[in-house]
Amino acid sequence: MKNTIDIRGEFYRKDGETLKSETQTIIVDSEYLIYEVLRIIGGKPLFLNEHVIRLFKSIKLKYSDVSFNKEELFEKLQQSINCLCDKNNILNGNVQILIEVNNNEIKNYVYFIDHYYPEDYLYDEGIKTVCVEIEREDPNAKVLNLKYKERIKKIITEKNAFEAILINKDNEITEGSKSNVFFVKGEKFITSRGEKVLEGITRMKIIEIIRREGYGFEERIIRKEEIEDMDAAFISGTSPKVLPIKTIGDFNFESASNRLISDLMRYYELECENDIEEQGELKS
């Protein structure tokens, strides 16, 4: 099945080769498209090593017989990102890594995509979200599903929401349509179990911070009817980072002023700054 994907900038990379797209689109042909989206800050990829590890995990979940070298992939992707930043003259934004597998033949694409980083007022006030009864197939593998994306986009637009919170067939809260979801109850952070969701890199970093700083933490099934008993909530992801939730359906929260969430937002920003600084001087 052929898929047309929009890209940002004129140039993209395919298997280590720089190509130019006159239409700012690329066409790929595969039943499953394994992907990762990472953030570029000053020409530096944020948490690249962690993204490659998860990419490798997704590939193995879908294609257990495919041979792949993580170290070699890391070097190729790092080189491709550096090249794309230079050729497109883009130093800040989101890059998508796409793995196409056909008859055990692997191709990789790297390209900039359009992004939206939430405005400051959304961090100060929180976002509106809506509950949607949708369950993603194989949530641990990051597989590109364009029909799913269009369906979610339509619902979010109709409800004038920022994000959709997914509810599975057992009436359990799993994740956001393009994010992970956390709740706060008293002095504890709560999120869905790893096997129920796509374990995002931002999610992973947040859990590391929570445990390192000694906050209460619980990873468990969260039922939809528990929403009204929670004190606060937020989503996490590559673009939003840690973004407070103001409403989930008809339920209102004061998440933006919650002390635990405010602390976490600060700690996560420091984590990002440290990762970028370790890579050397930023480009300008």
Image (spheres, rainbow, N blue to C red):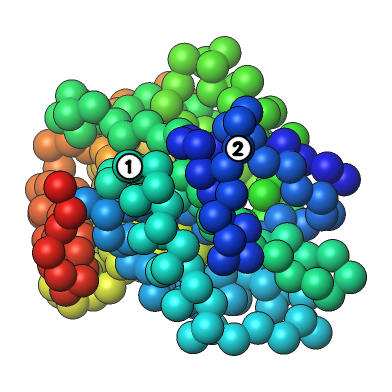
Is 2 displayed left or right of 40 in the figure?
right
Please report contact status of discs 1 and 2: CB closer than 8 Å, yes or no: no
Residue at 27% over, 54% down = 43
The mark nearer the N terminus, 1 or 2, is: 2
The residue lying toward the viewer, choosing from 8 and 193, is 8
In the displayed structure, 253 sits above or below 190; it is above
Q: From where the camera sits, is residue 19 visible?
A: yes
The residue lying toward the viewer, choosing from 114 and 146, is 114
Residue at 40% over, 63% down = 201
Residue 282 pos. (x, y %): 15, 58
Query: Circle 2 is placed at which residue position?
Result: 21
In the displayed structure, 207 sits above or below 69; it is above
Q: How many neighbours does mark 1 have within 10 angstroms: few (below 14), some (14-19), or many (20 or more)?
A: few
Three-letter code for the amino acid on which mark 1 is drawn: Asn
Secondary structure beneath dot 2 equals loop
Residue 155 pos. (x, y %): 61, 22
The residue lying toward the viewer, choosing from 261 and 8, is 8
Residue 72 pos. (x, y %): 52, 83
Query: Circle 1 is placed at which residue position?
Result: 89
Residue at 37% over, 32% down = 116
Is 25 displayed left or right of 248 in the figure?
right
